[in-house]
Amino acid sequence: MRNLISATVLAAGALATSIIPAAAQSIDDSVNQLFANSTGWFVNFIFSPFPGTSFPWIVAWLVVAATVFTLYFGFVQFTAFRHSISLVKGDYSDPNDAGEVSHFQALATALSGTVGLGNIAGVAVAVGIGGPGATFWMILAGLMGMASKFTECTLGVKYRNEYDDGTVSGGPMYYLTKGFAERGLPGGKALAVLFSIFCILGALGGGNMFQANQAHQQISGIVGQYPGWITGMIFAAVVFAVIVGGLKSIARVTEKVVPFMGVMYVAAALIIILLNADKVGWAFGQIFDGAFTGLGVAGGMVGALIQGFKRAAFSNEAGVGSAAIAHSAVRTKEPITEGFVSLLEPFIDTVVICTMTALVIIITQQMMIDPVTGNYMLNEAGTAIATIDGNTGVSLTSAAFGSAISWFPYVLALAVILFAFSTMISWSYYGLKAWTYLFGEGQTKEIVFKVIFCIFVIIGAAANLGPVIDFSDAAIFAMAVVNIFGLYLLMPIVKQELKSYTSRLKSGEIKKFN
């Protein structure tokens, strides 16, 4: 009898062991299929190309806007760069000004929403499809995007709502409403509502689903395959514990996490670059040649340009309007000062960190080159460059670092976790402010959104990369459609603020506090 019971227990255990993983995998598959089927139409619309070309209209929308703002404000990203650093240091900060966070905390919070897996996985996607030349266009997009960020964050502070309890709410939904009304322009309220809807979708997509997805991929690559919803549950619990405390809680975390993870990642990249110093010149040659010739990659020069601009926009979010929400909470009475601070974001995010990632991938020669033609070899489908072991996304970046430092994938796993975590908590705030704009302020309404946000963290970890990254891009770029339209009509107000501030700064009326 005892043997029969033991045999029954063992059989039941074996059956459970086989059923649980299968059920978990079934959940992952079901979530992925449902997600792909329900969002495909949205993705196709946002990334539809101009007739007769392969150039997406949304990329042109962002590029033209960044160029317009760069010229309109007299290359402010270069002329105000030094003063921006002084502001971040707190040289002109009055502790008595209205707002919730310092210039540095606002920058750290916004950076935590941009410095993320777009810098690791996104760059690998861009270089893997567009070749090294995509890096050149990524840097150019980052430099021009600094002017877009300057414009939107200045408006975010100028038209924010300040409440009696010391909290503030700001962002595109507020400057579209108030700014349009101030200039006597119609449609501001409708645009604000539309932006808020897209912002919520962006928060649930690029703000957490993509982050959770790539974090799971990196972790499972080290510890072995397991269901994605498990990673999602862990991330959701930790994220909820932070975001339930509001912006000040988020700022306290990001001001510590962002500098640490940024320095750690850049330092590791620099070590690999220095170890391969003899290949740096060759790598930059690949970047410049590929930017204008394509080096035989899919899509040629145009393909490199499209991928470079797409990845830069996804990574630094210049023109999207998301960062304006975080920067609106800064302690200042001069809106233009936060515009100056914010222009540092695309520089740090894209020009520095994204370039480091691209250089490591190129230098370690993870992408396969045809020894006869010197061009990069395409994969069997002809849609991307063939890589060693067929790696893509974060796996390609991990392989590149690991080829130079064998134990680095473990460090990168930590970086991925920190990047994903910091991005999710920042985007939870962006989505929350859009949510409260639509449904009103209140603790219960805030908790409802935070719970929904954390549920989507779990969904993102369980879905496959393809539909997640497509939806992430589409939702965030949709925000830019509405936001940039508003910026065009409101940029004269920013120019007035710029002229007023610079004249007072030169006259000595604006003085340092420290």
Image: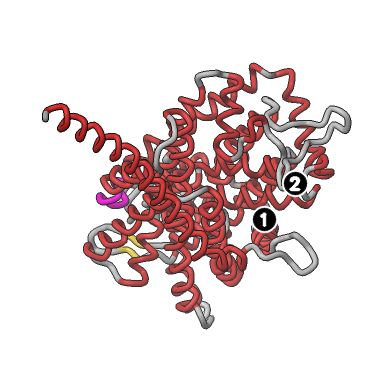
- Which residue does the numbered mark 2 point to in the structure image? 382
Is the N terminus in the top left, top right, bottom left or bottom right quadrant? top left
Give coordinates of residue 438: x percent, y percent. 36, 72
SS category of the residue bearing label 1: helix
- Which residue does the numbered mark 1 point to in the structure image? 70
Q: Which residue is drawn at 58% across and 26% down?
A: 401
In this view of the protein, which residue sits in the foreground, 487 or 182?
487
Label 2: few (<14), some or many (≥20) within 10 Å?
few
Q: Residue furthest right?
A: 372
Q: Is residue 74 visible?
A: yes
**C-alpha gap between disc 1 and disc 2:** 37 Å
| Number of numbered discs | 2
Position of 57 relative to 242 (above/below) = below
User: What colouring style does the render use?
Assistant: secondary structure
Q: What stretch is highlighted in magenta?
A: 243-249
Q: Does 79 appear in magenta?
A: no
SS category of the residue bearing label 2: loop
Label 1: few (<14), some or many (≥20) within 10 Å?
many
Q: Which residue is drawn at 59% across and 47% down?
A: 80
Q: Which residue is drawn at 44% across and 44% down?
A: 112
Discs 1/2, front: 2
Q: Which amino acid does label 1 sit on?
A: Thr
In this view of the protein, which residue sits in the foreground, 219 or 3?
3
Q: Residue at x 43, y 60 (%)?
A: 157
Residue 281 quadrant: top right
Position of 295 with respect to 248 (left or right) is: right
Give coordinates of residue 92: x percent, y percent. 43, 44
- Which numbered disc, 1 or 2, marks the residue that appears first in the sequence? 1
